[in-house]
C-alpha cells in the first residue's frame, strides 16, 4: 500500500535535562511537495532534524517512511532511507575537486580502484538534467558559494536521495542565485522528490513552498497550506504575537553633516582593481543612509576604509569636523563612530570571553572601568548588568556567560547595546539583521530608527532589499566599487533598485558626487 | 551534600583539575606497565626488583633508600623534597612562559632558546662583574634582570616576525632556538669563564659561587637540609602569582587575551594587535630567561657550555607543565612541582634498583607526555555534558544548537 506521505514524524518528543526541545511534534512530508519548516532560532528545528538523521533518539514518537515504521539510529540509517541534507554550513573538503567532493563517501570502486570515469558520467548527467552548472575539476576553495551549494545538491542527487532537506539555503546567496535555487527546488518537486525547506524568511516560503509547518518553543503550532495564508499570519504563528513587518517611522529631519567622505579609494586584496573606487558621500544627523548592492561590490571594503580596519589609498574622511582619514581604529571610535560589524563572530565578539568583558571591548581603558591598569571588576559588572537590562540581552549566566554559548540574536543585541551606549554621533551598522529571526529583526529596526530620531547619523549597509526599502531615508547603490545612484525609497521601486544593483543603470557622475 | 558535590563537579575549574589528575594517573599507570615489561625482559631484575620499581614510581619522593637488610625504607625525605623544589623553580618559569603565550593564542616552542639566552646573559653578568668591587647581592639582581631581558628580546623576535610578517611563530621559534644554541656555545667558547681550576670538569662553566654570587637560601636550607633548594622557588611562586594577576586583573592582560582569542575583534575594537603579539612573546621570553637565571644563579649548578647540538629539556618541559595546568599560572606552580618530582623519582629508580638511567628516562618521559594528555581527558569529561548542554539550552531564546554549531566552526 502506497502511503500519501513519504516521511512522517509522528508525536516526536525529545527532552534534554531541564528542557523539552521537541514536544509532541508531528511533521508529515508528502511525496513531491515542498514543505517549509518555519521557526525562530531555538524553536526546535535543528533538534527535529537531528532526530530524523538519527543523531538523537526521541523519547516518544515514531518515524514512518511510506507508512512503515523505521528505526533511525545513526546518520547511515538515514542515508540508507535516501534522506539527504544540504547543511547551512557546507560540508565540503576545500582542497578536493568538485567531483571528488561529490563522490566522497559513496565511491564506486573496482578492485579497490576508484571508478572516477563512471562517477563523472553520472554526475554530468545529473548536472545537465537539473541545470546545476558546476566545474567538476575545479577545487572547492576556488569556486563561488553559489556553486558550492550546487555541489552539495549534486551530492544528494548522486546518492539517489528522494527526500531532500535544505537548511537555511538562501542565507549565503545573492537575490539572483536565490531565484535559481527556487527554480531548482521546483523542478525536484515536479520529479517527485520531496523537499523539506528550513528557513525563517517568509517571502521565500510564500514563493516556493506548498505547505508550511510552524514550530515555536519546541511545540508544533500547526501546518498550513501556503495558498490559504499570508506572511503576516505566518509570522504571528512563528513569534506568537503580532509582529510589525513594516517599519514604523516618521519623516526624517536631517541636520548638519556628520560624516563627509570625499574621493575614498580602498585597494582590493584579491585583484589589482580598487575595491572602493573614488567614492564620495555625506551623511547628516537624523537620517538613515543605506548602502545597497549585491554582496561583493565593495561595501565591506568601504566600511573597512571608513572604520580604519583597512588603509585607504586616497581620499578624505571627516567626522564631526575632525579629519580622520589617517587615524587609527581607536581614534576614529573616539572621534564619534560606533560600528556594528558585518561578521559578529569575526569582529564583533571575543567568543571565548565573557559577556561583560565583551561589553567593554572598546572602553576598557576608560577611567570608569580601570584604575592604574587594573580592571575595576565591580564597575564592569554593573555596566554589563545595565546594558543587559536595557537591551534585553538574554543569556544563561548573565554578565559572566561565555558569548559563544549565546544565541545569534542575543549576541547581536549585546553588540548593539555596546555600540549604541557609547552615544556616538555616527552609527555604522553593517547587515545588522543577518541571520536573525523576525522578532529580533523588528527589534533592531526599531533601534535604528530610534537612533535616527535621537539625532544620530546612521549608515546602514544591507543586502536585504526589504530592509533597504523600509528602513532607510536615502539609498546609495554600490556597484563594482562605485556609487552608481542615489535613490529615495519613497519614490523608487524594488525593480529600479535592482537595475542599479545589477549595474544596468546608473545616474550621472555629478549626482554621484553630489 | 550530594547536590553540593554535583555542583562542584559541574564547575569548569573542577573539571580542569580533575582532567589533569586523571591524566597524571594514566601517565603513572603506563609508567608502571613499562617498568613491569622492562623488568620481565631483563634477567638482572627480579620480581622483587619490579615491585620496588612500581612502588618507587608512585612514592619515590618519600623513599629514604635501602636499609641494611636491603629493603626500601619510606618516610619524610627532606633532601628529596628540597631538590624537587629546586628543580621545579626553572620549570615554573618555563611553564609560565608557555602558558602566557598560549593564553594569547601563541604557541611558544621557543622557550629553550629563550632559556639559553637567559643562561648566557645571567652567567656572563654573574661571572663577569668582579664581586670584589660590586656587592654580590647587586650582581645577583643585575644577572637576574639581565637573564629576563635577554629572554624577552629573544622571544620578541618571533613575536615581531609573527606580528609584522605573519610568519608562523612555531617555525620562527624553532629557528631562534638553534640560533641561541650556537650563539651561546660560541660566546662561552671565546669567554674566559670555562672551568679550568678543576681538570675533571672539561666543558663546564664556573659556578656563580666562584664569583661569590648565589641565590640566598632564605632559610629553606634549614627546612630541607642537605638539599639544593634556595630562595629561587619563592621568587618563582611570587612571579606565578604576579602573572596570574597580570592576566586576570589588568587591562594589559585583558588586551593580550582579547588578541589571543580573536585578533580580528581586537583590531575592530581599536586594540593594537601587533603590539600585543610582540608583547606577549616578550613576556613569555622574559619568563623563560628569568627561569634560566634562577637556575644558574643558585651557585651550585654548572652549565655545560658546548650546547650547540642540543636544547635544554627544561625549556621544552615548559610545554607539558603548561598543558597540564591548562595554562593557569597558579596551576603551573603545582604541575611544575609534579614534573620535578618525577625527576627525583627517576633518580631514585636509577640509584636504588637495577633499572639504569636510560630506561628510567624513558619511563619518566612516558609519564610526562601522557600527563600532558589532560586536554584529551577534559574533552572526554566535558564531551557528554556538551552534547547535552547544546540542546539543553536549545529551547529558551538563550541558546540553540545551530548557534553552538556556528560557534564551534569558528573555533
Image (cartoon, coloured by chain):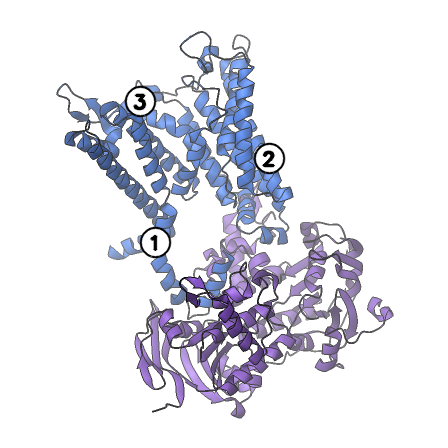
Q: Are marks 3 and 1 on the same chain?
A: yes
Q: In the image, what residue occupies the spot 26% across and 37% down?
A: B34
Q: Quadrant of the N terminus of chain B?
A: bottom left
Return the residue at label 2: B157
- Percent from the top left, x then y, of residue B144? 51, 23
Give the foreground label among 3 and 1: 1
Q: Nearer the viewer, residue B158 or A214?
A: B158
The residue that mark 3 highlights is B223
Q: Camera-side residue: B276 or A441?
A: B276
* A224 relative position to B88: left or right: right
Tell me how far mark 3 sits from mark 2, CA to CA: 42 Å
Q: Could you say which chain is coloured purple in the image?
A: A
Which type of secondary structure does the marked residue at label 1 adopt?
Answer: helix
Crowding at dot 1, Cα within 10 Å, few <14 / some 14-19 / many 20+, comes out as few
Chain B on-screen colour: blue
Comparing marks 3 and 2, which lies closer to the viewer?
Answer: 2
Residue position for label 1: B380
Binning the other alpha carbons within 10 Å of mark 2 as few (below 14), some (14 to 19) or many (20 upward) gives some
Residue A90 in view here: no
Amino acid at each position: 500500500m502506497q502511503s500519501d506521505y513519504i516521511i512522517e514524524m509522528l508525536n516526536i518528543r525529545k527532552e534534554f535535562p531541564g528542557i523539552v526541545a521537541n514536544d509532541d511534534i508531528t511533521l508529515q512530508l508528502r511525496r513531491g511537495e515542498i514543505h517549509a519548516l518555519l521557526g525562530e532560532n531555538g524553536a526546535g528545528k535543528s533538534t527535529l532534524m537531528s532526530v530524523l538523521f538519527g543523531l538523537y533518539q526521541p523519547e516518544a514518537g515514531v518515524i514512518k517512511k511510506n507508512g512503515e515504521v523505521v528505526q533511525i539510529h545513526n546518520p547511515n540509517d538515514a542515508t540508507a532511507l535516501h534522506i539527504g541534507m544540504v547543511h547551512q554550513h557546507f560540508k565540503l573538503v576545500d582542497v578536493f575537486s568538485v567531483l571528488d567532493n561529490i563522490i566522497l563517501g559513496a565511491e564506486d570502486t573496482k578492485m579497490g580502484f576508484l571508478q572516477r570515469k563512471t562517477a563523472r558520467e553520472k554526475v554530468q548527467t545529473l548536472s545537465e538534467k537539473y541545470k546545476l552548472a558546476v566545474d567538476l575539476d575545479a577545487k572547492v576553495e576556488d569556486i563561488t558559494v553559489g556553486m558550492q551549494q550546487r555541489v552539495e545538491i549534486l551530492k544528494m542527487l548522486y546518492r539517489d536521495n528522494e527526500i531532500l532537506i535544505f537548511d537555511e539555503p538562501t542565507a549565503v546567496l545573492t537575490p539572483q542565485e536565490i531565484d535559481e535555487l527556487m527554480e531548482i527546488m521546483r523542478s525536484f518537486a515536479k520529479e517527485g522528490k520531496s523537499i523539506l525547506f528550513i528557513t525563517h524568511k517568509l517571502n521565500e516560503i510564500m514563493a516556493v513552498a506548498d505547505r508550511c509547518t510552524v514550530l515555536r518553543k519546541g511545540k508544533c503550532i500547526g501546518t498550513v497550506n501556503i495558498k490559504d495564508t499570508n506572511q503576516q499570519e505566518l509570522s504571528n504563528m512563528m513569534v506568537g504575537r503580532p509582529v510589525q513587518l513594516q517599519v514604523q517611522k516618521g519623516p526624517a529631519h536631517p541636520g548638519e553633516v556628520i560624516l563627509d567622505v570625499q574621493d575614498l579609494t580602498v585597494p582590493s586584496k584579491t585583484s589589482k582593481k580598487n575595491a572602493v573606487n573614488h567614492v564620495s558621500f555625506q551623511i547628516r544627523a537624523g537620517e538613515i543612509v543605506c548602502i545597497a548592492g549585491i554582496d561583493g561590490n565593495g561595501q565591506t571594503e568601504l566600511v573597512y576604509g571608513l572604520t580604519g580596519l583597512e588603509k585607504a589609498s586616497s581620499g578624505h574622511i571627516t567626522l564631526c569636523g575632525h579629519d580622520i582619514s589617517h587615524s587609527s581604529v581607536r581614534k576614529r571610535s573616539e572621534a564619534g563612530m560606533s560600528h556594528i560589524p558585518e561578521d559578529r563572530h569575526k569582529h564583533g565578539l571575543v567568543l571565548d570571553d565573557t559577556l561583560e568583558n565583551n561589553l567593554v571591548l572598546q572602553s576598557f581603558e576608560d577611567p570608569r572601568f580601570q584604575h592604574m591598569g587594573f580592571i575595576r571588576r565591580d564597575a564592569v559588572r554593573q555596566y554589563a548588568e545595565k546594558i543587559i537590562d536595557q537591551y534585553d540581552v538574554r543569556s544563561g549566566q548573565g554578565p559572566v556567560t561565555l558569548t559563544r554559548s549565546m544565541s545569534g540574536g542575543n549576541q547581536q543585541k549585546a553588540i548593539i547595546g555596546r555600540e549604541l551606549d557609547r552615544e556616538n554621533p555616527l552609527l555604522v551598522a553593517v547587515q545588522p539583521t543577518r541571520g536573525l529571526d523576525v522578532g529580533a529583526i523588528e527589534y533592531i529596526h526599531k533601534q535604528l530608527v530610534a537612533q535616527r530620531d535621537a539625532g544620530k547619523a546612521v549608515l546602514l549597509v544591507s543586502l536585504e532589499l526589504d530592509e533597504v526599502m523600509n528602513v532607510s531615508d536615502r539609498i546609495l547603490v554600490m556597484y563594482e566599487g562605485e556609487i552608481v545612484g542615489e535613490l529615495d525609497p519613497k519614490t523608487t521601486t524594488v525593480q529600479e533598485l535592482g537595475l542599479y544593483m545589477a549595474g544596468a543603470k546608473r545616474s550621472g557622475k555629478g549626482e554621484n558626487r553630489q | 551534600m550530594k547536590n553540593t558535590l554535583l555542583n562542584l563537579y559541574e564547575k569548569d575549574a573542577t573539571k580542569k583539575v580533575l582532567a589533569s589528575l586523571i591524566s597524571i594517573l594514566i601517565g603513572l599507570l603506563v609508567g608502571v606497565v613499562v617498568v613491569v615489561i622492562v623488568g620481565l625482559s631483563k634477567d638482572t631484575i627480579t620480581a622483587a626488583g619490579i615491585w620496588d620499581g612500581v612502588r618507587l614510581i608512585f612514592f619515590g619522593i618519600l623513599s629514604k633508600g635501602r636499609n641494611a637488610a636491603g629493603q626500601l625504607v619510606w618516610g619524610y625525605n627532606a633532601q628529596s623534597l628540597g631538590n624537587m623544589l629546586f628543580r621545579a623553580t626553572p620549570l615554573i618559569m618555563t611553564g609560565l612562559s608557555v602558558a602566557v603565550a598560549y593564553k594569547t593564542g601563541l604557541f611558544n616552542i621557543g622557550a629553550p632558546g629563550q632559556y639559553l639566552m637567559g643562561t648566557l646573559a645571567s652567567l656572563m653578568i654573574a661571572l663577569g662583574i668582579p664581586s670584589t668591587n660590586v656587592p654580590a647581592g647587586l650582581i645577583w639582581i643585575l644577572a637576574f634582570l639581565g637573564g629576563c631581558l635577554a629572554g624577552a628580546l629573544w622571544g620578541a623576535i618571533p613575536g615581531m616576525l609573527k606580528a609584522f610578517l605573519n610568519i608562523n611563530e612555531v617555525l620562527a621559534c624553532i629557528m631562534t632556538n638553534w640560533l641561541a644554541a650556537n650563539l651561546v656555545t660560541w660566546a662561552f667558547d671565546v669567554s674566559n669563564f670555562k672551568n679550568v681550576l678543576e681538570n675533571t670538569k672539561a666543558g663546564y662553566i664556573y659556578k656563580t659561587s666562584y664569583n661569590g654570587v648565589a641565590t640566598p637560601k632564605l632559610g629553606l636550607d634549614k627546612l630541607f637540609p642537605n638539599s639544593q633548594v634556595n630562595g629561587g622557588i619563592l621568587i618563582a611562586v611570587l612571579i606565578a602569582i604576579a602573572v596570574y594577576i597580570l592576566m586576570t586583573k589588568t587591562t594589559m592582560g585583558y588586551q593580550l587575551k582579547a588578541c589571543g582569542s580573536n585578533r580580528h575583534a581586537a583590531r575592530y575594537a581599536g586594540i593594537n594587535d601587533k603590539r600585543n603579539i610582540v608583547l606577549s612573546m616578550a613576556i613569555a621570553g622574559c619568563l623563560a630567561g628569568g627561569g634560566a637565571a634562577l637556575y644558574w644563579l643558585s651557585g651550585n649548578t654548572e652549565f655545560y657550555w658546548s650546547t650547540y647540538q642540543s636544547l635544554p629539556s627544561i625549556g621544552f618541559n615548559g610545554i607539558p607543565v603548561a598543558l597540564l595546568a591548562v595554562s593557569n599560572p597558579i596551576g603551573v606552580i603545582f604541575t611544575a612541582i609534579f614534573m620535578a618530582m618525577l625527576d627525583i623519582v627517576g633518580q631514585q629508580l636509577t640509584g636504588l634498583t637495577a633499572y639504569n638511567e636510560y630506561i628510567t628516562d624513558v619511563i619518566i618521559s612516558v609519564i610526562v607526555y601522557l600527563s600532558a594528555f589532560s586536554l584529551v581527558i577534559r574533552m572526554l569529561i566535558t564531551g557528554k555534558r556538551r552534547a547535552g548542554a547544546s540542546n539543553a539550552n536549545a529551547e529558551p531564546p538563550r541558546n540553540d544548537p545551530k548557534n553552538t554549531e556556528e560557534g564551534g566552526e569558528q573555533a
